[in-house]
Image (cartoon, coloured by chain):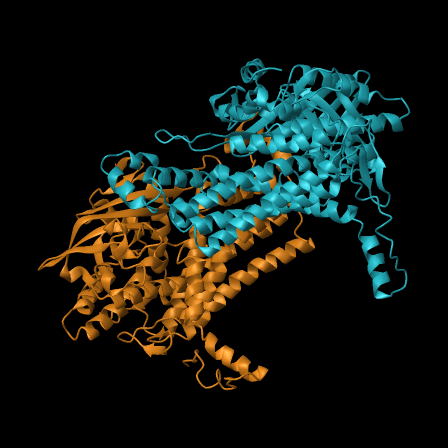
Chain colours: A cyan, B orange
Amino acid sequence: MRTKQDYINGLSRMKRNLYFDGQLIDRTDELQMRCLNTIGTTYDEAAKPENEKLMTAISHLTGERINRFNHIHQNTADLHNKQDMTRMLCQKVGGCIQRCMGTDATNAIYNVSFEADKANNGATQYHENFKKWLTRFQKEDLIGCCAQTDVKGDRMLRPADQPNPGAYVHIKERLKDGIVVEGCKVHISEASVADEVLVVPTRALREQDKDYAVAFAVPGDWDGLKQVVTIHNLREREHFPRGFMPGSTDSYMIFENCFVPWERVFLAGEYQHGGVNALLFALFHRHSYSGCKPAIGDVILGTAALAAECNNIQKAEHVRKKLAEIIMVTELGYAAGYTASDLGGPQVFMPGKGFVPYGPGSYIPHSIYCNVGRCLSGEAVWHESEILCDLAGGVVATFPHEKDFVNPETKEDLLKYTKRSSKVSVEDQAQFWRFLGDALCSATGGIRNIGAYHGGGSPIMEQIAITTQYDIESRKKLVKYIAGMSGGDREALAKSNFIKRPKKDK
Amino acid sequence: MRTKQDYIKGLSKMKRNLYFDGQLIDRTDELQMDCLNVIGTTYDEAAKPENEKLMTATSHLTGEKINRFNHIHQNTEDLHNKQDMTRMLCQKVGGCIQRCMGIDGTNAIYNVSFEADKQNKGATQYHENFKKWLTRFQKEDLIGCCAQTDVKGDRMLRPADQPNPGAYVRIKERLKDGIVVEGCKVHISEASVADEVLVLPTRALRPEDKDYAVAFGVPGDWDGLKQVVTIHNLRPREHYKRGFVPGSTDSYMIFDNCFVPWERVFLAGEHQHGGVLALLFALFHRHSYSGCKPAIGDIILGMAALAAECNNVHKAEHVREKLAEIIMTIELGYAAGYTASDLGKPEVYIPGVGFMPYGPGSYIPHSIYCNVGRCLSGEAVWREAEILCDIAGGVVATFPHEKDFAHPEVGPALLKYTKRNPKMSAEDQAQFWRFLGDALCSATGGIANVGNYHGGGSPIMEQIAITTQYDIESRKKLVRYIAGMSGGDREALAPKTDKKKTK
């Protein structure tokens, strides 16, 4: 396994294809260092002996020890560990750890490429190609990102019906040695700091959309790929630095006559598998959210409690009620992920059929629990901001700048007049309001709210997943029985294979 | 009446006492220009003949035509006009018009200074002093701000019990020719661009808090006053300009051995009147919100509808439901202010007593309606942000920078790939997402949310006002009668209703 410094050295050798605000920049540009420090934490922490169980795993391909972020889940313990690792790391950086897209995409493609080959009766070698790619990915301890969301053009039209065919990334040409792709993926988190980009479809596809059923992996600086990047940093502090300074990036990834050789192609035209791949990445990614969102909830809870303490109102009844509300969202989200891990298996849910075996045997978390958890957490975002705003009061919106706290003309007055609770030092109170200002009154804070609401699939996507997968019909039959209506069935739910608790050998 | 340019010239002559990020700055510093353009709109619009009725009034003191922002409400028509003027101007600048603190501060002090003098039986001349101050304020068409919120130190302690006596602004010393004040007012909007600062108390006061019952008016650059300012500007645009660029400021106002002569003092020690003054400014200011919040709602509605149109989802059922939700908040807030205007009187509500005549005859909007309206609008802020986020999708969070759109290597591809609705130009769609990004993904947008939630009194303050002023007891009696319990009264609400139509 490599170190954070190895990772940064690797990035520094990549070709310049990142555009930021009209400039071509290096991957190791000062602007990206906050982001590199965030991802770098996954290397630093994996190297600590006490984190070995949580942060590393034995590769089922090579038998070697690898970073868990590059692992294919082999059992429910792997799913539990991924959730807990994500929560721990997100706590340490106070937000998104930014490496889960790689895990989630590799696990999705690993399964779908297998099934596509099976359906093609040996005419394709997607799965073998992917395993070769994965072996290097694991050995070299690379960072992967996942390019799923297409620009989507007119929201009322499906891929093949769009006036701009590149509104969804598609196969423009099939050559003997590979494919040529075109289109643009958008909102691709950490694409500008990733070694490898995993491209997967973003939605269910029809037969006429088959050219859009494409999955592949290329290095982030591949020929025919340009990235237009937005970089989300907080205002730099000169006098009163934060404990940890996170950063993140997102890319528009523009594929233009981009050639991808067959050994890097994992799906090319199998439209049904394309749709499953979209859902399966989303599923794994929503499972990741059951780790990160509780960690963000931990930070929000600490923030809310400290806001109350700075204001010396921590004993007020309404404060307790609000803290309880935050805790409920945090732990319900965690519990949903925990249950999804524990009920995981080499299977997927097919509407109308229930759970059916899927893939070569790796573990997939339970879909309903991943979706209810992420939907709850996603929808709580703005209300959590409201709670922070409510408990803090206006202080965060008009807190004077750092240098006014240093200027001898104003410093003493400001310390005198910003002191609230007599039990917290005034310097700590000021430092806390600066921190809360980063969350509520910064561009990056606003961007994080939108990311936390929509990222991993907007609430509407989870609502669709929940209602199409949940066995509502059986509940209707049960109620019909109890109500004494025709067509009732008292055993409707007993027959379901919806929850099969695994036997635990402890 | 003066012009925007006169106003800016006036500011340029003021003494430097504004600190921003460690620097002393001028009032006409480039950083403050977007804010001056917002307030300047109140001069530009008042000069237009078509706005004469809405934006000007005849001073009851001098009989001269003045800007309505410097007027004392003489009838319900004035209250209606103030609400409608506020909504019109806030629409034009796409947010807070920033001059209402002056009108709300003057109207509150006008009434309370009269009542304090009456109770002091001629021992004080607060009201005459204030009328003199007001006459000049009206004649010179000045901008006033209102310094109400104190830093408040330990939230569990009242003013006189604070370890730091300056946690609330107070009279430190009484001299023959005036008072010396000390303390710090915080979040004072537009104090750094105001000609005059009206200082008044922030809460109910006990007899032992009497030194905190102080109201006065001083120029923004007065001796003994320092302002530490935060300035809320949007990211400047180089290639793709907005139609209007607003700006705003807030100050920490530090009064340090600040001498105020008696002719500028409008309350000094009358603790009960101090509490009423705090409430009365809040009441007038919540009435202002019934103009500005509907205007901000107009903008939010336009944004939500355009976001849906850019995404070509404007015909979807869930979009209509969300637009309806925004409209409901807008128009319920407006209706609350309308009713408060129409039921306005020279009266205030005293809990337990009901409405009582108050002040020298100027008009005060109805308290319950001002409070229910502002509470609804304030609590809707984060939900409205959520709706915008929901309809827009992630596009605002990761929209590329201006210069990437101007760059020949990537600009054309960005236009190609950011185009969503085929019926709207890609350039307009990009311009819209930039605008929405200013609202949802900027420091200033976040600050506006916090301001819209807490400004004019946090929702909890309105809830306190509503529940203490609303006649809950009569409702209980009525229900006791209907339920057949003891102590019921079928006529509890019928004979003395707390709203009386004035016309």
Q: Give the left or right position of residue A288, taking residue B249 as reference.
A: right
Q: Would residue B231 be seen by someone viewing this image from the given angle?
A: yes
Nearest to the observer: residue B155 or residue B332: B155
Residue at left offset 80%, top offset 53%: A472
Residue at left offset 83%, top offset 30%: A270
Looking at the rendered structure, the number of numbered marks drawn on it comes to 0
Q: Is residue A122 above or below residue B31?
A: above
Residue A186: x and y in percent read 63, 33
Image quarter (top left, top right, bottom left or bottom right) of the C terminus of chain B: bottom left
Q: Is residue B206 above or below residue A90?
A: below
Q: Give the left or right position of residue A390, taking residue B56 as reference.
A: right
Q: Give the left or right position of residue A460, taking residue A384 as reference.
A: right
Most extreme residue toward the left is B176
Residue at left offset 70%, top offset 23%: A71
Q: Give the left or right position of residue A286, taking residue A130 as reference.
A: left
Q: What is the quadrant of residue B103 in the picture? A: bottom left
Residue at left offset 91%, top offset 25%: A121
Image quarter (top left, top right, bottom left or bottom right) of the N terminus of chain B: bottom left
Q: Would residue B393 be seen by someone viewing this image from the given angle?
A: no
Residue B485: x and y in percent read 55, 83
Nearest to the observer: residue B307 or residue B221: B221
Most extreme residue toward the front is A506
